[in-house]
Amino acid sequence: MSVITVEDLHKHYGAVKAVDGVSFEVQEGEVFGFLGPNGAGKTTTIETIEGYRVPDSGRVTVLGLDPRKDGYEMKERIGIMLQETALYPDLRVSEVLRLFASYYHRAVDTDGLLEMIGLQEKRKAFVRELSGGQRQRVAIALALINDPELIFLDEPTAGLDPQSRRATWNWIGRAREEGKTVFLTTHYIEEAEELCDRVAIIDHGVIIALDTPQRLMAGMEIESRIDFSIEGVLDVASLESMPGVTKALGSGRGAFKIYTPDAQLALKSLIALAEKEGCQLKGLTVEGATLEDVFIRLTGRRIRA
Amino acid sequence: MWPSAKSSEPTGSHGLDYEGIAGRVVEAVLARQESPRVRTDVTTVGGSEEQEYNVFDQAVPGYAVMFAMFTVLSAAGGILEEKERGTFKRLLVAPIPRWSLLGGKLLAQYLMGVVQVTMMFVFGALVCRVDLGHSLLGLLLITLATCWATTSLGILLVAVIKSRKQIHPITTLVILGSSAIGGSWFPLFLMPKAMQQVARITLVAWAMEGYNRLMILGGGLADVWVNIGVLVLYGAICFAVGLKLFKFKEA
């Protein structure tokens, strides 16, 4: 069952077409990601679905409701984390949670929520005393305060330290396990790969690809890179002549890189060659295709260019 | 008279007769004082012969209404501050009805306005010996109505004003302008008839007329119910128009 349906959404600001004909569906229980560089139209799209922005044209349905007509009912059932969540600096953490809980008919226990975001000791602290990561966690708690069926996260880990980012990913995973649908935007490749069941790659207001991360990467036929170093002697030419290898590079100090569309075949050949030549392979790593490669392939530039 | 002018040496370098000029100025000033162009008539209204007119009977409600007008500024400032800080956006994506969102803001400002005005009157009565008149109920009702009208005016202004930079010039103009012509600073009934009619576009005029009737003219509730009604209506219109014009969504 589709939880969000967007049909031919258009939105412009002056001469800039922020969203230029976007259509997609989000299915119940999946984590759906919008991946794209800053200014690609991610926030405009998510805020239009949330009912905060008015589109020029197009149709949006959320949980079977029209966000513009049935906004009130829709808001009761969704959770939202804005890109920049401003909180009241002079309220205590527990007060912020109680305040927002009071806006919903159905609200979860705020103590349990505090425990989940790991801020029990900070419950009496003023918001202004919290670090950026802690505030972000409060924003997460606010998105979950009404036990929503559908959660919107706009750049949930932007600017977070690796530890906080990992914690955020964990609770997004937990939300999915509980059967909630998640719609997130991100410009972090790793985040989309790690979290999303399906990813829409958006650029200049247009969706240029939409599939599971695995199929997106497989579909591009992007080569893997194998890095290693050896003790012994191997020449680049014999590496390049191995089956499944398209290119080999040597550093001259025993370190090599080989490129292959078929990492399994190339590894077999490499190991066979090393044994034949009596060399010891060291520091062997295989770098597969990433969504970054997909993005570069599709747009000709890096995502954070 | 003018000893320094007389004793100073005539500066002959430019050939000007300073002593002569000073003398003529003094003569002109004295001539004016002998036949003043402005006559001051003091009229005592409603008080007994022995009772002196207490200037605070006008000043206390005058300043109270002006302070109530300043809650306009707080109401407008509070919402624009939230808009600029981003907390308002977070409220907008929560299931809060529009009337409740603005109404909640308004209620807090309203209560503060009422407390402020009440404190002015308590101070006026205890310290300035202001005569509160015969109808405390009338005084209370006109205060409640005045604060409702000023706070609603604040909501209307915030719907029209774009940023916090614009608040101060616009609200100051509205507050001081309507205080001046509305009778906060001097009694309306001293103004020309035409001005009194113009003043009626301000809520200050309706409020001040009510206070003057109760406190200076010694009237009762029956004398001010029109004022109360107009102020309640004034507030209702401002609130409704403000609600209509307020931008809850991004374009």
Image: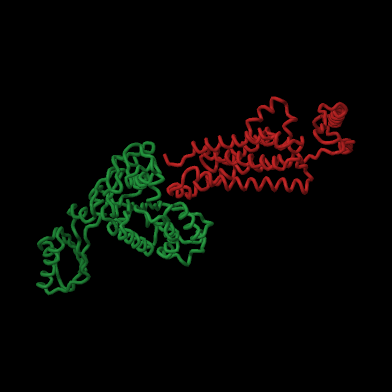
Chain colours: A green, B red
Residue B8 showing in the rendered view: no
Residue sitting at x 40%, y 50%: A76
Q: Give the quadrant of residue B226.
A: top right
Q: Which x, y percent locates residue A104?
A: 44, 52
Farthest residue to the front: give it.
Answer: B222
Q: Position of residue A112 (x, y in %)?
A: 42, 64
- Res. B205 visible in picture: yes
Query: Residue A22 sits in which quadrant?
Result: top left
| Residue toward you, B232 or B166 | B232
Is A141 left, or right, of A214 in this rendering?
A: right
Question: Which residue occupies 38% across, 38% down?
Answer: A13
Image point (61%, 44%), residue name: B71
**Count of labels in the image:** 0
Give the answer, above or below, for where A123 lies relative to B203. below
Query: On the picture, is B46 further left or further right than B243?
Result: right
As drawn, is A223 to the left or to the right of A59? Answer: left
Residue B50, picture quadrant:
top right
